[in-house]
Amino acid sequence: MIFMKKKQTRLHFEGLLQKKKLPIVILDEQWHALFPKGKPSIIVSLEKKLNDLVKLQGRYVSEIKELKTAKKGLMNGIVANMEVDNSPEGKKKEKKLDKSQKLIVDINEKLKEVDNELADIPYQIKEANENLIVEGMNICYEKMSDNTKQIKELDEKIITMRDELKRMVIEKQEMEEENARIYSYMHDILGSEVIELFDQYYSKHKR
């Protein structure tokens, strides 16, 4: 029953998140700060999946850039060797042109392949990012719920301690006032010289 409830909650929020433009949270320091005592294994696993996709996207982008650079170099070489004839040098240029053209065909096929792979990556990243966020928010809200419960308990303890502190302050004041009354009365009937002797005696023997 709990599993079904969590699954329904996840589907509900994933539907809401699809309408929003979200940052890639593994690149956000504030995201990592949500887990100061360490991340649950599910978060670590989802982060790895997302991180692998981001790296894969970067690798495909770099590969496309390298292929386009190589293709440009071959095209420039073809233009430079366009003039061919039946001379040994001309035949050499012709072979080089044929080789370059075949390489360009191979590069075009590879570019098409990598482009196709890359086209789906942003959607995979978006889905992985949303799954990570939903799971992270579930964990964070459970933590906030636990914190709220403990905050309530601490509030109750603070109120009890505050009442106890007030009682202790009143009790302390009453005892101080009683001491002052006793000391004042004895001082009046015995005088300062006798009281001073009592003070000296009790300061030494009644610690």
Image (cartoon, helix red, strand yellow):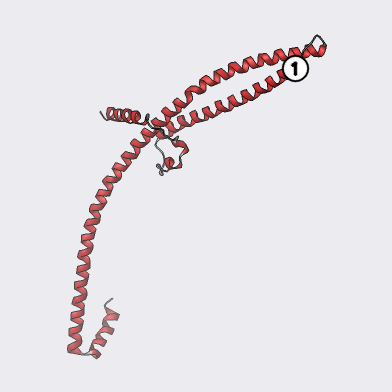
Q: What is the x, y in percent for residue 107? A: 62, 18
Of residue 192 and residue 64, the one placed in the foreground of this image is: 64
| Residue located 20% across and 83% down the image | 184
Q: Could you classify mark 1 by the number of other residues whose Cα lies within 10 Å: few (under 14), some (14-19), or many (20 or more)? A: some
Quadrant of the image for the C terminus? bottom left
- Taking the image as shown, residue 32 lies to the left or right of residue 166, namely right
Of residue 185 and residue 138, the one placed in the foreground of this image is: 138
- Residue furthest to the right in view is 87
Q: Amino acid at mark 1?
A: Asn
- Taking the image as shown, residue 112 lies to the left or right of residue 45, namely right
Q: What is the x, y in percent for residue 120? A: 47, 22
| Residue located 46% across and 30% down the image | 50
Q: What is the x, y in percent for residue 19? A: 37, 30
Count of number-bearing discs? 1
Above or below: residue 164 compared with residue 149 = below
Of residue 191 and residue 83, the one placed in the foreground of this image is: 83
Residue under label 1: 81
Above or below: residue 32 compared with residue 62 = below
